Image (tube, rainbow, N blue to C red):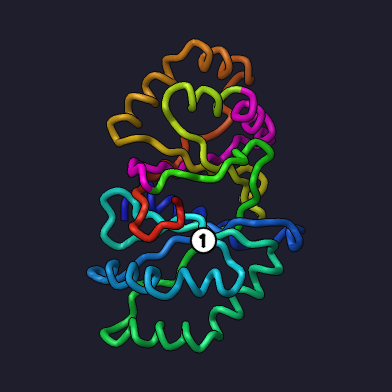
Amino acid sequence: MTKALSSLAVVLFLGGIAMTDTANAEVFELRIYTTHEGKLDNLHARFRDHTMDLFEKHGMTNVGYWVPEGSTNQLIYVLRHKSRDAAAKSWDGFRNDPVWQKAFKASRVDGPLLSKAPEATFLAATDYTPKKAWKNGKEGGFFELRIYQAAEGKLGKLDARFRDHTIALFEKHGMKNLAYWHPTDEPLSKDHLHYIIWHESKEAAAASWKAFIADPDWKAAAAASGVGRLAKPPISVYMQATDYSAIK
């Protein structure tokens, strides 16, 4: 596991510790699966042929599925739920569905696919997350998941900088804003921001980030947002959509 993925796993674990009052609000669920070596293709087949349809059957919306760059045993995906209560009911229905139980059993004839339990965190969209639907599946390219931990008491200022400056500058420099979320559960809800952006290619990502950092407008916004860092250096994971990703 890469350093970024190891850090991501820690974040996802912490995200499930303490539930806050989000039972009736729309939520997203970011999940990471780690397979035994050589089992990732089997996991893909199970999602492609069974899991995704069963998620939809039980009220969960498939948002996107990705493999981290260079990984041979990781799958990251996002689901959308009508509410936290609905998520609990959906998962209960899914796990008890005879169709799922049959598919699950068949996929494990040669042994379990996962090397450990899935890790997950629930997320709520920020007020500046784009409203438009994601339309990047046929374009290829690279997705980038970034996770920020704000300095103590600075999450609001970090949000303001993204809302008022950063997301527009990302678009200016060729990066597409897809989603911005806050974890719903403590302790991550106090200081974390998760987001996903899209690049045409890895080379384009490097060029975009270089241009963004050098942009005078970004430098002015960063300076105006306050003295000192608003956040720790982010976790960054480049990802490619699977062939069955829900992003179309």
Q: 120 or 45, which is in the foreground?
A: 45
Q: 177 or 32, which is in the foreground?
A: 177
Residue 115 screen position, x and y as percent: 35, 72
Using a 10 Å C-alpha cutoff, classify the residue at mark 1 as few (fewer than 14 neighbours), some (14 to 19) or many (20 or more): some
Residue at which label 1 appears: 62
Q: 229 or 241, which is in the foreground?
A: 241
Q: Which residues are magenta?
A: 138-164
Q: Quadrant of the N terminus?
A: bottom left
Residue 111 screen position, x and y as percent: 29, 83
Q: 112 or 245, which is in the foreground?
A: 245
Which amino acid does the dot numbered 1 rest on? Asn
Residue at x-position 47% and y-position 34%: 176
Specify whether residue 13 is in view: no
Toward the left, the furthest residue is 38
Helix, strand or loop for disc 1: strand
Based on the displayed image, in which of its 4 quarters is residue 139 positioned? Answer: top left
Residue 91 screen position, x and y as percent: 59, 74
